[in-house]
Amino acid sequence: MSLTELHLALLAGAPRHGYDIKQEHDSWFPDTRPLPYGQVYATLARLQRDGLAEVVETRVDGGPERTVYALTADGAARLRAWLAEPAAPTGAGAEEIVRKTVSVLHTGIDVGGFVARQRAAHLRRIRELQATPPGAGPAERLVREHLIAHLDADLRWLELATELLLSPDDQPTVRPDERKPA
């Protein structure tokens, strides 16, 4: 995910300070890792440096000083250009589930246990996501449905992996515990 453009989208509704941007991000994507404050402020500094956002005021509301940022015309144009481009399809094969499954394939270590644990973890997460809290808006529902679809695809992929992992033709010829020391 491009944090630069995402910050621009978070600023598009109204000028905001870093705390508001972090809170808005976390409400837009409630089922993902919260955005760290340090990342918010570092990104805001880059946006300002690059002329994509500007400081419109500094507030002191009985607490720490809060710098309020707004999109510049260049920032709005960059946001529109980003939204006009389709997102690149993922699937580079570097996700942890793929790395672990391929490792199991090559090592033969606890194949059945690995698949069972991975399936159980995916099914548990799908159930959690299906328990949409009352009042969830369409954006939150869309994010959850996207996550569920990916988990479902992983489960179908695990079925294929199970066939390959448990096939005697695809097992390693030399197991790690059978290797001779060098």
Image (cartoon, rainbow, N blue to C red):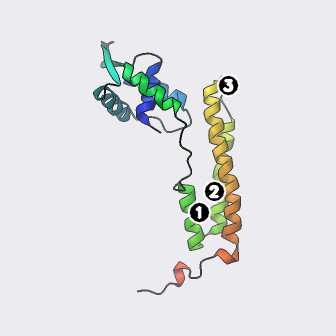
Tell me, for residue 21, which label it has, or none: none
Mark 2 touching mark 1, by CB under 8 A?
Answer: yes
Sequence-wise, the earlier of marks 2 and 1 is 1
User: What residue lies at 64% left-to-right and 25% top-to-bottom?
Assistant: 138
**Residue labelled with disc 1:** 101
Label 2 vs 3, first from the N-terminus: 2
Q: Amino acid at mark 3?
A: Pro
Residue type (three-letter) at the residue carrying disc 1: Thr
Question: Circle 2 sits on which residue?
Answer: 118
Residue type highlighted by circle 2: Gln
Picture residue at 47% right of the left edge, 35% below the top: 34
Vertical side of 145 occupied by 12: above or below: above
Query: Distance between the Cα atoms at labels 2 and 1?
Result: 10 Å
Report the front residue among 94 and 117.
Answer: 94
**Residue 80 against residue 31 in the figure, above or below:** above
Label 2's element?
A: helix
Image location of residue 39, percent across then percent down: 37, 35
